[in-house]
Image: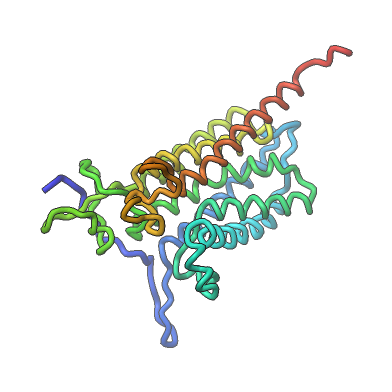
Amino acid sequence: MQAAIPFPDLSSEVFSIALFGFEFALRWYALAYIAGILIGWRLAVWTVKRAHLWANDTPPMTPRQIEDLLTWVILGIILGGRLGFVLFYMPGYYLSHPLEIPMIWQGGMAFHGGLLGVVFAVWLFCARNKVPLASTADMLALATPVGLLLGRIANFINAELWGRPSDLPWAVIFPGQMAQDCGQPLGEVCARHPSQLYEATLEGLVLLIVLLVMVHRGWLKRPGAVAGTFFVGYGIARFLVEFVRQPDVQFQTVGNPLGLALHVNGYGLTMGQLLTLPMIAGGALAIWVALRHARTATTPDPAT
């Protein structure tokens, strides 16, 4: 039997209470969302209270405006995340079962959809309140990795979104029939990559450290650079982890066991990888534009 780590005895619920015949439970995933949003909010407030971090010593908005923006962001996360899952991953199913689209309590949220929802919500907020979009995006980019870190840890606690079978010494024996169905010999267990923890480390912790260092070194004075770095960093991290993440079951067939959304003769990309490519390209473009504008602003005009 291969060396592997048994899944710890963890419950998906923080606690549950029964009231009037109904049971109410606080789940780790919900707590991760709440904690991520609150910590991100405080990080955003921390930056706008330090005017010297921003271009022309002028933050993009006030702490009070951040509170208003928070409502828009939450709506963008929920609506975008759900619609993204419906459209990107299971359009056929939900076309046949449209009444199930609002049932987010049954699971099914897509990060890329949530990101698009937040982008749209932030664009509307900035347009209505006449605040700079690029600097606002930088502020939100710094606030996001904490939520990703906590969300992926919650995925691990829930024993969901695990990785592909692995014989590495840190592979985890996840519970459940689906996790244990990987074609192993009779009587042996199936160990898998803890891909949730890979993502928590790369998309959450490492990306947060990189962005904090950038902010400390004055990169908020180049509007759009921090946000661009977030998009590039997340995109690369997600692209790499997809190689060891369990394929999306809706894309798996006998001829496509890896669950590739786009492939030729067994070689291709997963849906997660396809969705990260525009993020990487857009983030790189945002960094280029930010640096170009910064150079233009510091270059003396020859006519003067």
Image vertical order of residue 167 relative to residue 299, above or below: below
Residue drawn where x is 57% and y is 51% of the image: 115
Q: Position of residue 196 (x, y in %)?
A: 37, 49
Task: Identify the image quadrant of residue 198.
Answer: top left
Closest to the observer, 258 or 14: 258
Which residue is most to the bottom? Answer: 20
In the displayed structure image, the side of residue 182 where residue 228 appears, left or right:
right
Left or right of residue 162, residue 75 in this image: right
Residue 271 at x, y percent in the picture: 46, 49
Residue placed furthest toward the right: 304
- The residue lying at 56 percent from left, 54 percent from top is 113
Q: Is residue 37 left or right of residue 253?
A: right
Residue 208 visible within the image: no
**Residue 125 vertical position relative to residue 82 in the rendered view, above or below:** above
Please report the residue visible at 75 percent of the width from the left and 37 percent of the height from the top. 58
Q: Tell me: residue 47, above or below residue 180.
A: above
Figure disc tally? 0
With 23 as the anchor, is 110 left or right in this view?
right
Q: Depth check: give the residue in front, 285 or 20.
A: 285
Q: Where is residue 99 in the image (x, y as percent from the top left)?
A: 54, 75
- Residue 158 seen from this side: yes
Q: Where is residue 105 in the image (x, y as percent from the top left)?
A: 47, 70
Question: In this rendering, is residue 168 above or below 219?
Answer: below
In this picture the colour scheme is rainbow
